[in-house]
Amino acid sequence: MKKEALLAIDNVEIYPVISFVLYGLFFAGVLFYISFKKKSTIQKMKDLPLD
Amino acid sequence: MSLEVFKYDNRIVRNFAFATMLWAIVGMLAGVVVAFLMAFPQLLESIGLHTEFTSFGRLRPVHTNAIIFAFVGNGIFTGVYYSLQRLCKARMFSDKLSYIHFWGWQSIIVLAAVTLMMGYTTSKEYAELEWPIDILITIIWVVFGWNMFGTIIKRRESHMYVAIWFYIGTFVTVAVLHLVNSFELPISFMKSYSWYAGVQDALVQWWYGHNAVAFFLTTPYLGIMYYFIPKAANRPVYSYRLSIIHFWALIFIYIWAGPHHLLYTALPDWAQSLGVVFSVMLIAPSWGGMINGLLTLRGAWDKVKTSPVLKFMVVAVTCYGMATFEGPMLSLKNVNAIAHYTDWIVAHVHVGGLGWNGFLTFGMLYWLIPVLFRTELHSKKLANTHFWLGTLGILLYAIPMYWAGFTQGEMWKEFTATGQLKYGFLETVTNLVPFYILRGIGGLFYLSGAIVMVYNLIKTAKQGSFEEETEAQALALKDQEEHGAKHWHSWFEKRPTQMLIGSLVVVLIGGLVEMVPTFLVEENVPTIASVKPYSPLQLEGRDLYIKEGCNSCHSQMIRPFRSEVLRYDPQDLEYSKAGEFVYDHPFLWGSKRTGPDLAREGVTNPDAKWHYVHMLDPRSTSEGSIMPAYPWLLEKQLDTSKTRDKITAMRTLGVPYPEGFEEIALDSLQREAQGIANELKKSQINTYADREIIALIAYLKKLGTDIKVKDK
């Protein structure tokens, strides 16, 4: 049943590739974000367990 | 704008902490027993305790489940319930849900222990529990998630600290893993068949199995590490930036790595390669996390000398580093070729289990109990004694097991000058007994340490006074001003639901990419025309094989090596093919060869008498064997009340039994059983045709015979 449902989707094989690319972009975004994050915010988050 | 006053609930934390201690002792004791059974298989017989309920095949999953879900599970909840409230500056969402979660989880553990000993098992490692308990687990997991998300939503701290991300990732992934792998068709109360078959079942199972390690034994403990190490060392985590990368990289990469448990098997090559690549990539985030944990202690190493809490934590993080370096190495095909099915894997798992999970739990408990009971630790000296007993225990466990693994892996592959296998399988086993004894002693050391801890912490609790609730104050979230520019990731950090969905998407990608093609593409599982469904008697025998946990020690997967085909299929030198398993609900490839592979047992050893005598007393046919005896199989009548339903269920799952076959299934079963009883009679063994042993023999005689028909 699961097989038929998946086969019914046109070009189903493209979805994993799209997902993979999306994740790659997301991860690049994370790297970019943490590189430019303000020191004070990072420090605030670091200190949360010690509050 | 005013400060809100609220109280943290410490009772639920204390309850989970004490449950952790109780199940630690139970799980480790079961481990020590099964460890010594491998050295002295007649140990329980000698003290009159060898029954079907206490045989190795049933006790081994009791040990693994008790350690993973009872000891570590309760450890996770202890850490989560303590840290989540403080990180969210909010009491748990609902005391009632906390209560249901606690007692629900303990009930699952008790039910698991009882049912596993009674032989109710699906055979899938770390997912052995039958469908009614699976449903209960789902309900209790939802209760936990509901309570956790309720708390996060009503928090008074806008940022969610990274530990909370790990908790969210754990919740969502464990839910997905449990649901997908528990897809089974119930036959009756406490009996079901996996919805998947053969190769597909193996892929789903090890996608689950690997990620149970990742998302039950690792990610929640990383959350605990990121909270409790800074707390115990009284300094913030070394790099918060690194922890963000650690989280996303880990949850994304881990989910792909499952197929490294199936290298050189009948799993399609592309899936194996994908597993290897992602496993190797795992070193990066894992070591990033380990370095982050250890460097948190920079400038505080003097404290490590004097604080038992930090000592435990340092060893825990070091073991995490060792295990996560070794894991990727074991995923390399050339290393895996030697290590797989041997005690090397057992050593690897226990460096993680004893070192990472065990020691981090101990460190957390030594820090937490004095805090909850507002007192000092009863005895630092006893805690240090525990530390050394535990450390020696790990060494005494791991070193002999590595040695045993290398030894056996090499012995299996050694040839004589004339090209024959140098060692019989049994020789490679008897050679390991001294290592098994040492391992048992290591386990005893570790268990003794844990008992010392329980004593020490109970004394600590007794000398202090328990603080049921801790009062705290914080501004309501709406009253807190936001400063600085908004980044898209900050948006994530403040939105638990979106974080949950983000984590879910990330973990689903890996699962889907691996599974969808395996289910879709016919060529991935080529069928073999001569492979036929099991006869009703063989099917009943197969269920007994599952019930007795034979797959704990016997594989059914001949890898494509000369050393394996020569040993397990000397006539035709055939390795196992995907098409041989198309009717196997569930698959029974196994993951350890304490005994030999049985994939072609029906061809290499079809003698009914041999199997009959072997089950009664394994050492009478195989001198020095460490297999337990199964005398009850010779006595007990085979239960055929569900045979008809089993045939119908198998047809529902796609096994091509002819229409109406279930009506004549019992006749067929009795005819085949009588044939085996007659065969035994010719060998001077008089037995009834309706005994369980007959069905098991029928199954063993069938193994590997279908593929031979094709060759003729």
Image: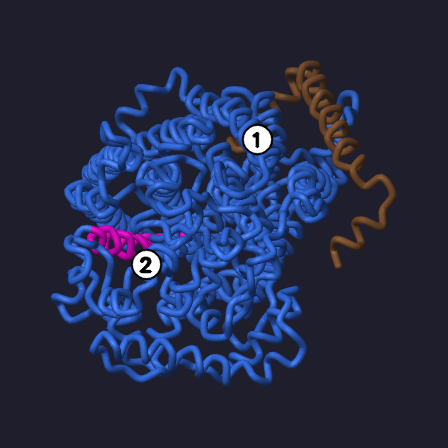
Find out whether the residues at labels 2 and 1 contact each other: C-beta distance under 8 Å: no
Q: Is residue B297 above or below residue B139?
A: above
Chain B, colour shown: blue
State the residue in front, B356 or B304.
Answer: B356
Residue type (three-letter) at the residue carrying disc 1: Ser
Q: Residue B273: which disc?
A: 1
Q: Residue B605: which disc?
A: 2
Residue B606 location (% of width, % of height): 34, 62
Taking the image as shown, residue B276 lies to the left or right of residue B362, namely right
Residue depicted at x 31% and y 84%: B688
Q: Quadrant of the N terminus of chain B?
A: top right
Answer whether residue B391 is visible to the viewer in this image: no
Residue range corresponding to the magenta coloring: B17-38
- Which residue occupies the extreme front position in the image? B712
Check if residue B55 falls in the magenta segment: no
Residue B368 location (% of width, % of height): 39, 43
Between marks 2 and 1 in the image, the one whose residue lies nearer the viewer: 2
The answer to whether tags 2 and 1 share a subunit is yes
Check if residue B33 falls in the magenta segment: yes
What element does badge 1 sit on?
A: helix
Chain-order first, disc 2 or disc 1: 1
